[in-house]
Amino acid sequence: MIALALKLLRDELSDYIVQNKRSGDGITKDRIALGNIASMDNDTIVELKDSVIITLVNIEEESTLKNGSHIVKTNSGIKYMEPAVHLNLYVLISATQKDKPVADNYEFPLHRLSLVLQFFQAKKSFTVKNSPFSQISSDQPGVEDDWITNELRDEIKLNVELYTLTFEQINHLWGSLGGKQVPFAMYKVRLVKIQETSGIEAPVIEEIENNVLITNAECDE
């Protein structure tokens, strides 16, 4: 579910960036990608250069939705299962330069980052229905990993908000990533639902029998 949520955001964001990119910017949709920005200094991973990279850096449980019901209705009755876990995803979106950047090329990452900010300022809520550019919106599986059931489609409801870091937090973040800082923005993506569907099934209770045993003494009374 985490991968599906980030794919949905990536597909919608990539269409917006390509449609609104600056003149002379050769970025294409495949350059807006899910990836580990910590690997950017690896010379063998060229896909992270001159791109917009979406990296998951932290996960937190939504405490306000922690105590859910253990009972789920099914077509044949009910099922006892652990409540779903609702997650907030902290997503780092980085705009990188080419292998050998020059001064003028720095403007392209800055403009791409501006487009990221514009996109999420204009659209904060995401579902499959309001995300026409996402591959997972299609019933046709084109790519195996992009196919999901209708039930999962209905469960994807994401709220995206800008998350501001302090200078100290920025220093710790990029220090833990082990790379040089590039233009970036951090977003908090709420709420991603995770639930294991296995559980104990029980039929629906359709009638209640009330069998009362009456003794001879009670009859005499």
Image (cartoon, helix red, strand yellow):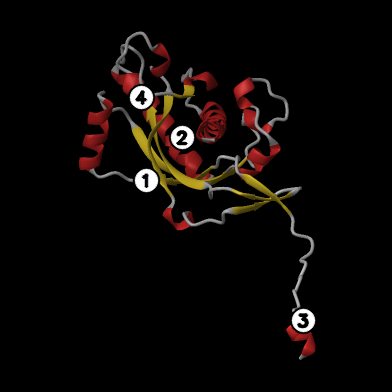
Quarter occupied by the N terminus? top right
From the viewer's perspective, is 171 left or right of 105? left
Cα–Cα span, label 4 and label 1: 18 Å
Which secondary structure, mark 3? helix
Q: Do tag 2 and tag 4 residues touch (Cβ < 8 Å)?
A: no
Does residue 220 sit above or below 36 in this rendering? below
Q: Amino acid at mark 3?
A: Asn
The quadrant where residue 116 appears: top left
Which secondary structure, mark 2? helix
Which secondary structure, mark 4? helix
Q: Amino acid at mark 2?
A: Leu
- Residue where numbered disc 1 is placed: 163
Quarter occupied by the C terminus? bottom right
1 or 3: mark nearer the eye: 3
Could you say which disc has been placed on residue 37 in the image? 4
- Residue where numbered disc 3 is placed: 216
- Residue where numbered disc 2 is placed: 115
In primary-sequence order, the first of circles 3 and 4 is 4
x%, y% of residue 73? 69, 52
